[in-house]
Image (cartoon, rainbow, N blue to C red):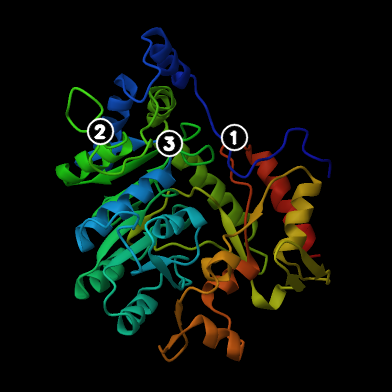
Amino acid sequence: MKRFENKIWLSSPTMHGDELKWVTDAFEKNWITTAGENVNEVERLVAEYTGCKYTTALSCGTAALHLAVKLVGEKLYGQPKPNQGTLQGRKVFCSDMTFDATVNPIAYENGEAVFIDTEYDTWNMDPVALEKAFEIYPDVKLVVLVHLYGTPAKMDEIMAVCQKHGALLIEDAAESFGATYKGKQTGTFGIGNIISFNGNKIITGSSGGMFLTDNKEDADKIRKWSTQSREDAPWYQHEEIGYNYRMSNVIAGVVRGQMNYLDEHIAQKKAIYERYKEGFADLPISMNPFDSVNSVPNFWLSCMLIDESAMCRQVRGEQDSLYISESGKTCPTEILEALAKYNAEGRPVWKPMHMQPIYRSNPFITVNGNGRARSNAYIKEIGMVDVGADIFRRGLCLPSDNKMTADEQDVVIDIIHGCFR
């Protein structure tokens, strides 16, 4: 096989031309600021699409998460003292298998993330582990949940646990815009929720994010904070800390031009997922799973998990990895190297947060076969492999770019077949 002449990307922006129309409109009207028709229209379109009452356009998904965490922290614990965060010293339950942008806002507000292990059915937060976490830390009142790779979590079970313990929920739906659970859009279940328009997401503005809520006061509060908390006065009056987090009218023009293509992108991503699933039917692997009865993912990234029996020996350090090639077996490192050799991009699945150097001392809750909760320290002591760590060890994200042709994907499938020979 020859190298791809044009690189096959993991997930790159797919532009259509409408984006330039609205960006040009911003230039022609000289609205090159964090206000304008594009910002207003993007907020309206997202609210209409998701069924959410109020949306606030922000500079990125991380900014939206920060303000969501700050908002809920203030609701729970009141306004903090000067130089303190709204979560000052308090614990927050958080998805473990995710990008660190999910977790960092908890630290921004001086809280401590307690990581909840993953389950195999959807690769999302395990409701059983969440229940055990409340038994260990009954005073926790905030849960931050991620819908990994565009796949909805077990929302009925997660919501039931939160309601039982009087906890509020924030949804990080950065990767799952357009995905639904029982017909309801992800990003609309929690008290405050976010989506992302980063360059590799299902639709993009090159950057940008959105806060979603059904509470007008909360939406107004987020909008105020995102524009440096200016008071309604004829001069610059400030009575609380603010941030420069509002979305640019230029970026909003790109998002506005993308919105009409969201369903088309989802259909393209789904076709990629299904071609992989069919192409790997004879291999000892499985695709990233979802609940086909209750949920419809947006299929943002197609991922694979190698069967334990087909894993060759692999060792990973902090930044490097080694493996021993074995006939009939392979590992994520070998597959990623093979893809790169042919000019195709894949990547490891998210390394769980409890394994990250910056968060290794944080509490981590998983459950073993008898349902008993396990701490991070206990897992290390007995050598037990938690679910997130196991998926990280055996899983990888496949090229999922919706501009990849079927023929190009067939070559990717052949490359991966070759790794098992």
Residue at which label 1 appears: 403
Q: Alpha-carbon neighbours of circle 1 within 10 Å: few (<14), some, or many (≥20)? A: some
Q: How far apart are marks 2 and 3 (CA)?
A: 21 Å
Residue type marked 3 = Gly
Residue sitting at the far top: 28
Residue type marked 1 = Lys
Residue 208, label in figure: 3
Residue at which label 2 appears: 230
Please tell me whether mark 2 or mark 3 is closer to you in this view: 2
Residue type marked 2 = Arg
Looking at the picture, how far across and down is residue 364, in whole percent?
47, 76
Quarter of the C terminus within the rendering = bottom right
Q: Distance between the residues labelled 3 and 1?
A: 22 Å
State yes or no: discs 2 and 1 in contact (Cβ < 8 Å). Answer: no
**Of label 2 and label 1, which has the lower sequence position?**
2
Q: Which residue is painted at 83% across and 72% down in the image?
A: 326
Observer able to see residue 84: yes
State yes or no: discs 3 and 1 in contact (Cβ < 8 Å). Answer: no
